[in-house]
Image: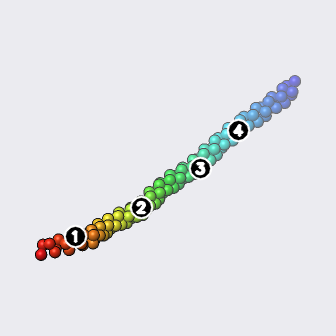
Amino acid sequence: RKLGNRVLSASFETWAAAVADAKQHGAALARAGRMIRTFANRTLAAAFATWAEAARSLSVQRRALGAAVQRLLRRGLTAAFQRWAENVVEVTRQRRTLGAIVQRLQRRGLTAAFNTWVT
């Protein structure tokens, strides 16, 4: 009976040691898994932060480029409007000049008669 108890006791101790080793191994694996996930999350977070910064930078560049293009377009429109306004002023001046010439031509006979009467 003692022999049976010794074998049973030795078997139980072997089993208990195996369970304790398995628990330690499992805990070590769990720690390693957490460490790997933490590292992966840090790497992923760093990659995301890099991407987000690049996206913000690109957005700022797009807005700046859009503003520059708008200024160029407005400059072109302003120049075209300026030319149109100058043409309006010139055409108005020419119409007044031609109107004065036409009136003088129409009044030529009247002017000649007036000059004859005065002299």
Is mark 4 in CB contact (under 8 Å) with mark 1? no
Q: CA distance from mark 3 to mark 2?
A: 51 Å
Coordinates of residue 40 in the picture (x, y in percent)? 62, 47
- The reply to whether callout 1 and callout 2 are in contact (CB within 8 Å) is no
Q: Contact, CB < 8 Å: mark 3 with mark 1?
A: no
Q: Circle 2 — which element?
A: helix
- The image quadrant that residue 96 belongs to is bottom left
Q: Determine the image quadrant of residue 37.
A: top right
Q: Residue at the spot x=24%, y=72% of the render?
A: 109
Disc 1 versus disc 2: nearer the observer = 1
The one of 35 and 28 positioned closer to us in this rendering: 35
Label number found at residue 77: 2
Q: Of the numbered discs in the image, which one, if any, rests on residue 43?
A: 3
Of circles 3 and 2, the one toward us is 2
Q: Position of residue 53 (x, y in %)?
A: 51, 52
Of 83 and 48, the residue lying toward us: 83
Report helix, strand or loop for mark 3.
helix
Give amino acid for label 3. Thr
Q: Classify the position of the N terminus by image quarter.
A: top right
Kind of residue at badge 1: Leu
Tell me if residue 51 comes above or below residue 5 in the rendering: below
Is there CB contact under 8 Å for labels 4 and 2?
A: no
Look at the image and tell me in which quarter the C terminus lies: bottom left
**In the image, residue 59 above or below residue 32:** below
Looking at the picture, tell me which residue is in the foreground, 52 or 63: 63
**Horizontal and vertical percent for residue 68?**
44, 60
- Residue type of the residue flagged with mark 2: Leu
Q: Please tell me which residue is depicted at 42% across the width and 61% down the height of the picture.
A: 77
Badge 1 is on which residue?
A: 110
